[in-house]
Amino acid sequence: MKLIIQIPCYNEADTLAIALKALPKAVAGFDIVESIIIDDGSQDDTIKVARECGIDHVVRHTHNQGLARGFMTGLDACLRLGADVIVNTDADNQYNADDIPALTKPILAYEADIVIGARPIATIDHFSPVKKVLQKLGSWVVRAASGTDVPDAPSGFRAMSRAAAHRLMVFSDYTYTLETIIQAGQKNMAITSVPVRVNGDLRPSRLVKSIPSYIKRSIFTIIRIFVIYRPFRFFGGLGSLIFGVGVLIGLRFLLQYLQGNGDGHVQSLILAAALLIMGAQTFLVAFLADLLSANRKLIEDVRSSLRAEVDTDGVLETVIDRDRIYSTRVEADEFLESVIRNSNDLSGAASSRKTPMSSNPLAKKSGR
């Protein structure tokens, strides 16, 4: 079994050495433990520091593409390097690396596909009260959208199996934490959480440049999550609200009309008609968005299947045998050998039943 610990980096020369030195060299249940950094277009000595610390692998973006893109680049690289389990952590040493065995344990026990490290948010001193509230709000939104019970959805300290990594796809450029959990929930992956410890604050958060900016980004991310992953609920709820207001205003006009005061409330009639039409149109958008969502899921399934079959390094990625997914190369090789043996046996049996003339279709022609 092979474990690869990935660290997305962007100008992390000041803190990366501390994070790398804290990584475990051996983890229970794994024969090989390696580390990889994803340099997202850093302008400092991030790569130099990583190499000096003995990093196993380096993947580099030519320019900054954002944390989410760095995360996905890391997953692709880890899969090509033959990782059976992938752990993601931060370059600022925010998370205690001694908890990596706790993250991987549920995956090794086949109890989970993805494990999220739950931080003690309430006791983290360098988190402002506003950030703590937004962290809880974000986790609640993710639980509602994904049908999971993850207490700390924004946590970037997480582990995932090879099969889970194949199926994840992030659309956002800002962050991957919320979106990956929602995808996993919709794809019926097993998700669990384990409590993890945090270290002292070494630098300000790159995602939280200011509280107003963080609030704006968080609200936009939450709305976008519902639009992408719960489109019928989002547009259906919005359409119901608009249509309901139109009905109330229409009833108000009808009441005034029955009392003989309809001439002075024509504006209400016009507004009610406009809202009813807008509500009906929003309902139609809800159905169309739901169809697009279903199409997106099909495309994601096709992509994950192709991603699992492509072997860019000559290493078998995933072999599926009816109900079982072979996640390790050893199991896959054994399965392929059995398939080859069975096919050879069947071919031999079929050849033995054929006549000499039929076994050589050119014999008749050569006799001419």
Image: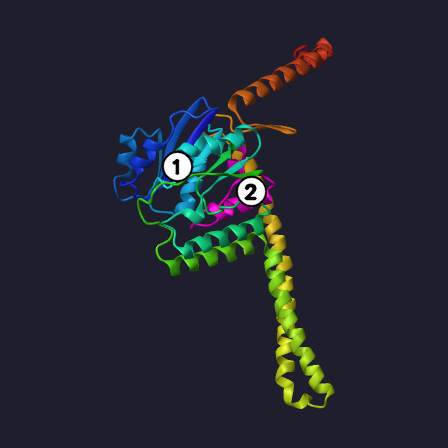
Residue 258 at least partly seen: yes
**In this picture, residue 362 sits left or right of residue 5:** right
Neighbour tally class for label 1: few under 14, some 14-19, many 20 plus, Cα within 10 Å: some
Q: Is residue 110 above or below residue 226?
A: above
Q: Amino acid at mark 1?
A: Asn
Q: Nearer the viewer, mark 2 or mark 1?
A: 1
Residue 341: image quadrant is top right
- Closest to the observer: 169 or 338? 169
Q: Which residues are magenta?
A: 163-189
- Label 1: state its secondary structure: loop
28 and 318: which is toward the camera: 28
Residue 236, given in percent of the width and then of the height, sits at 63, 61
- What residue type is disc 2 on? Ala
| Left or right position of 306 against 356 | left
Residue sitting at x 46%, y 47%: 154
Q: Which mark is residue 184?
A: 2
For mark 1, what is the residue? 96
